[in-house]
Image (cartoon, rainbow, N blue to C red):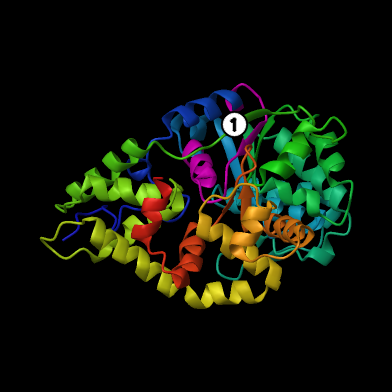
Amino acid sequence: MAQANTPLNPFFLSPKIPDKYFCDRREETRTLSRLVTNGSNVLLMSPRRMGKSGLIHHLFELPEIKKAYHTFFIDIYETSSLEEFVQKLGQEIVGKLSRRGMGPLLAFLRSLVSLRGVFSLDPSSGMPSFSVGIGEITRPEATLDEIFSYLEKADKRCIVAIDEFQKVADYEQKNVEAVLRSRIQLLRNTTFIFSGSERSVLGQMFGSASRPFYQSTSSLSLGPIDKDVYADFAVSLFADAGKTLEREAVLDLYDLVQGYTYYLQRSMNAAYALLPDGKPCDRTFLFERVDEILTAQTDSYQDILSALTPNQRALLAAIALEGVASNITSTEFIRRHGLGPISSVQTAARALMKRQFLTRDPQKRYCLDDKFLELWLARPFGITPKIRLGQNRR
């Protein structure tokens, strides 16, 4: 029986992970903490599902941060306008302030002069809620000014983390970067973490002299957790529950999913939950759990593929078969995978990168963002997790 206050499964899949079950990232945490506490805005980059959000939430839970700062986190991946950005930020601030009581919450709502008259009471708590529709934010720049003004007057310093910040570049309004930059550069009580996964887009936003955020931040890149560190972490969590995990199995899984944190955690979560009493978790058992996850994702992945063009599907499958692909417009690559003309491959690659199916590293090598989708696409060609593991080690 699980002990009191012990979670059923210690391999958390959400970004908010209790410190006891948070794996490593000590150096990254120290660096990020040092930067924000010294007033530096930070650009945090990594591929999706590598653990950026988890690192930020871990930072926010540090005792020294919780004591001295108000912290706010918004994910703008599904936003498409400044109005939606402002709505997300307002909702996050209201959510945090509501835990501190009616006084701070009312003070914030009163500061939003541009939205006066559109707030409602939450029927369950009786407290005002930020149920403001997009159409009701008629002057988003004015509302943004009011929110930032409130943060500047807060009783503690503030840290605002904006996840998937590259989405701002896709907003219909073409001046949003300038709107945000012109205001953020004037703030003294608020520090920002701009987190994102599209390296090429973020590189342009923060590295091009013609863009508003040019050289306005310190940069931090997040890579995979060290393989041996993660293996020790996983083995110890199994041991804490009286379970046996073979270390080599974890190392093999790590190679299979190329160290991506989410896919490691998802696989270990399933293995931990399903391991029979008295049976060790070896590679066979662990890879069987990966296969089960892939099977469960079939309907979802089929829906995803149905929304792509034939050229996009063909290129995605070709890169999935290779694991990591270089020179995707070369005659050899196109011939090997039966792709169309170079121009169609280039167009498909741009579209897949924009939709975050593909990522490209500084060496211009392409791979799928979703490692389970990569394995699933390779299945019809007879590439099992065991075979892919061998390919990854070549």
Task: Describe residue 382's horizontal placement relative to residue 95 as left or right.
Answer: left
Depth order, front residue of 62/356: 356
Q: Residue furthest top?
A: 38
- Assess disc 1: are there few (<14), some (14-19) or many (≥20) residues with their C-alpha within 10 Å of its C-alpha: some
Depth order, front residue of 201/216: 201
Residue under label 1:
220
Magenta segment: does it hold 62?
no
In the picture, the quarter occupied by the N terminus is bottom left
Q: Is residue 308 above or below residue 351?
A: below
Label 1: state its secondary structure: strand
Q: Tell me which residue sits at (64%, 69%) in the image.
A: 313
What is the span of residues highlighted in magenta in the rendered image?
36-59
x and y, in percent, of residue 278 in the image: 10, 60
Magenta segment: does it hold 46?
yes
Q: Quadrant of residue 349?
A: bottom right
x and y, in percent, of residue 90 in the image: 70, 52
Task: Describe residue 9's horizontal placement relative to residue 107 as left or right.
Answer: left
Q: Quadrant of residue 219?
A: top right
Q: Is residue 213 above or below residue 264?
A: above
Amino acid at circle 1 = Leu
